[in-house]
Amino acid sequence: MAEVKLIGAWFSPFSRRVEMALKLKGVEYEFIDEDLSNKSPLLLKYNPIHKKVPVLLHNGKPIAESSVIIEYIDETWEGPSILPKDPYERAMARFWVKFIDEKCLVAMWKACFSPGEEGEKAKEEAAQLLKFLEEEIKGKKFFGGENIGLVDIAANFIGYGFGILQELMGVELLTKEKYPNLYEWIDGYINHSFVKDFLPPKDKITEVFKAFAQPGYSGYKPKF
Ligand SMILES: N[C@@H](CCC(=O)N[C@@H](CS)C(=O)NCC(=O)O)C(=O)O
C-alpha cells in the first residue's frame, strides 16, 4: 500500500488545502505537524528551496507547493475530480487560485497587519480584489459549481480564518453587506459536512492570530 505523509502545520490554510484534497480522494495519510519557528531537518531536507509547509511525501518522494500537490493528488488517486475536466475550466480554476495566492491573500493579510498608510492602501486594494471573487461566485453554489473544487479548497482562508482575523483586528473588510454572494458562499462552505471537519477551533486560531499581533512577537509569522 502507498505510504502517504503530509508535513504540515495545523493552523496553516496551505496545509489544510492538501488535507482537504487527500480527504476528498479518500487517501489515508500521516500528518506530521511542523513547528515553523524551529523547522525540522525533515522539512529542510524535503523542501530546501522554500522551507515551507505543506510537503507531501508519497512513497518517500517529496512534492512541495500546495497547488502543485493538489494537482498531483487529483491525477494520482481515483475519486471525485478536484480540477474540472474541461481544459478551459481547468485553466480558469488555476487562474483563480493564482489570483487568490498572489493578490487577495497578500492584500488581506496586509490589511490586517500592516500599520499606517500601507495598511490603509491594502484595505482598499483587498476590497477591490474581493469584488472580483464576488462576481465570480455569483449564481454558483461553489467556485467549483455544484461541488467543492480546486478554487474552494484554495480559498479556505477567505472562507474561514480571515473572518476570525478581521474581527480580532477590528477590520471590516469582508462583510455581508459589501459581499453578499461571497458571504453566501462562506455560509455554504463552512457548513458543508466535508469542510466542517477541517476547521480548527475558533479559539485556537484566535490564539495564533493574537500572538502574530503582539508587538515584539518573535515566533513564526507569515510574511507577504
Ligand atoms: N506557496 C506556498 C505557501 C506555503 C506557506 O506559506 N506556508 C507557510 C505556513 S502557512 C510556511 O510554511 N511558512 C514558513 C516560512 O515562511 O518560513 C504553498 O502554496 O504551499
Image (spheres, grey):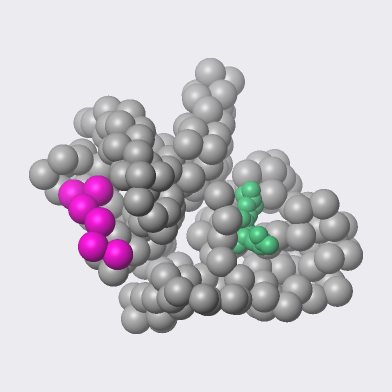
Taking the spot 58% from the left edge, 20% from the top edge, the residue there is: 87
Q: Is residue 9 visible?
A: no
Taking the spot 25% from the left edge, 42% from the top edge, the residue there is: 182
Q: Quadrant of residue 118?
A: top left
Q: In which quarter of the image is residue 6?
A: bottom right
Residue 174 part of the magenta segment? yes
Taking the spot 29% from the left edge, 60% from the top edge, the residue there is: 166
Q: Quadrant of residue 27?
A: bottom right
202 vs 174: above or below: below
Relative depth, front residue between 108 and 145: 108
99 left or right, relative to 163: right
Image x and y of residue 121, in percent:
35, 39
Taking the spot 25% from the left edge, 48% from the top edge, the residue there is: 173
147 left or right, relative to 63: left
110 vs 95: above or below: below
Image x and y of residue 165, in percent:
34, 64
Image x and y of residue 140, in percent:
27, 34
44 vs 21: above or below: below
145 left or right, relative to 184: right
Image x and y of residue 97, in percent:
52, 37
Residue 116 part of the magenta segment? no
Q: Which residue lies furthest to the top in this view?
A: 88
Relative depth, front residue between 215 and 126: 215
Quadrant of the displayed image that contains ligand 1:
bottom right
Numbered range of the magenta stretch? 169-175
Look at the magenta stretch and give its main secondary structure: loop
Q: Which residue lies furthest to the left in this view?
A: 177
Q: Can residue 8 be seen in this view?
A: yes
Q: Disc count in the image?
A: 0
